[in-house]
Image (tube, rainbow, N blue to C red):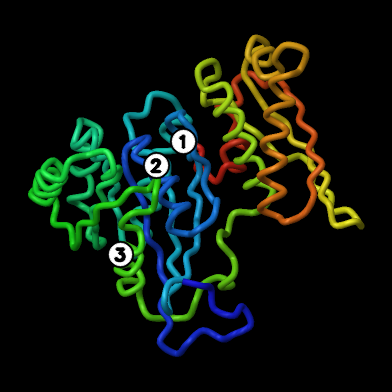
Amino acid sequence: MPLPDPQSAPPSDARAGFVALIGAPNAGKSTLLNQLVGTKVSIVTHKVQTTRAIIRGIAMHDKAQIVFVDTPGIFKPKRRLDRAMVDTAWGGARDADLIALLIDARKGIDEEVEAIIERLKDIKTRKVLILNKIDVVKREKLLALAQQANELVAFDETFMVSALNGDGVKTTLDFFAKSVPEGPWLYPEDQPSDLPLRILAAEITREKLFERLHQELPYISTVETERWESRKDGSARIEQTIYVERDSQKSIVLGKRGQTIKAISQASREEISDIIEAPVHLFLFVKVRENWADDPERYREMGLEFPK
């Protein structure tokens, strides 16, 4: 459905609200969010735990503005950063108008999903179930999984989707558009995310970093946009720093004769340029910052609470 004219006022019967996407790591939340919104707002990699902070994607559907909250994957936390991510995920779920639990239909209800469902029982917010990856799972298994999940928690609706190819996404959007509260829109209707461009650009570079080095690099590595300069010719000059915890990781990111970081930079520059619809001059630096995961300032920059 095309977006309404950005200059038009919201209709008198407009709706707007928040839908929290929760699930275990790698359930496909980021991929689904990008499908629901229709553009890139959340990074998708082979690495579990790529979504750190809450990333909001905004979809206009019929007369509703649906603000999707892509929370970090919920899992058993081992480190301080893990705890911060899990706390953020549950906080996002409690604050939403609806909670959508996404389950990887190939994995079914494993130990991680069971733990999430157990906590969902105590949350009064309306809940829907979304079974993902239906393109690779037989119908009988999907129906059995839907029945099993609904016996554990009273879901208002169950949807079956393929976040990868978009099957079932429109039906899911139709339901959310009818279910969010009546009221004025919360954001400009032509805005796909409330994520500042500097952070989105850093997330894109982090995605390219993990796509290239997901075997060698721990997900604890981070990227920060240090400078963003808009030039008179309409282009943007962006400086970003990739922070790692050890010198050995720095060598991995740089690669032989700088080939790895050059490839990461090129892929990131092209995608950022597509998003801002302007030429981008991207300069990447790699620095070692030991124990950054214990620095409260880093958590604030990622939109996470620093766990004591």
Label 3 – label 2 distance at C-alpha: 30 Å
Q: Amino acid at mark 2?
A: Asp
Q: Quadrant of residue 85?
A: top left
Marks 3 and 1: in contact by CB < 8 Å? Answer: no
- At a point 74% along the width and 26% down the height, the residue shown is 262
- At a point 69% along the width and 12% down the height, the residue shown is 251
- At a point 43% along the width and 25% down the height, the residue shown is 79
Sequence-first disc among 1 and 3: 3
Q: Amino acid at mark 1?
A: Pro
Q: What is the number of the mark on residue 307?
A: 1
Q: Amino acid at mark 3?
A: Thr
SS at mark 2?
helix
Q: Residues within 10 Å of mark 2 (few under 14, many from 20)?
A: some
* Residue identifier under label 3: 171
Label 1 – label 3 distance at C-alpha: 38 Å
Comparing labels 1 and 3, the label whose residue is closer to the camera = 3
Comparing labels 3 and 2, the label whose residue is closer to the camera = 3
Sequence-first disc among 3 and 2: 2
Marks 2 and 1: in contact by CB < 8 Å? Answer: yes
Q: Residues within 10 Å of mark 3 (few under 14, many from 20)?
A: few
Q: Where does residue 180 sit, x and y in percent of width and height?
A: 35, 71
Foreground residue among 76 and 162: 162
Q: What is the number of the mark on residue 87?
A: 2
Vertical position of residue 183 compared to residue 295: above or below: below
Q: Quadrant of residue 192?
A: bottom right
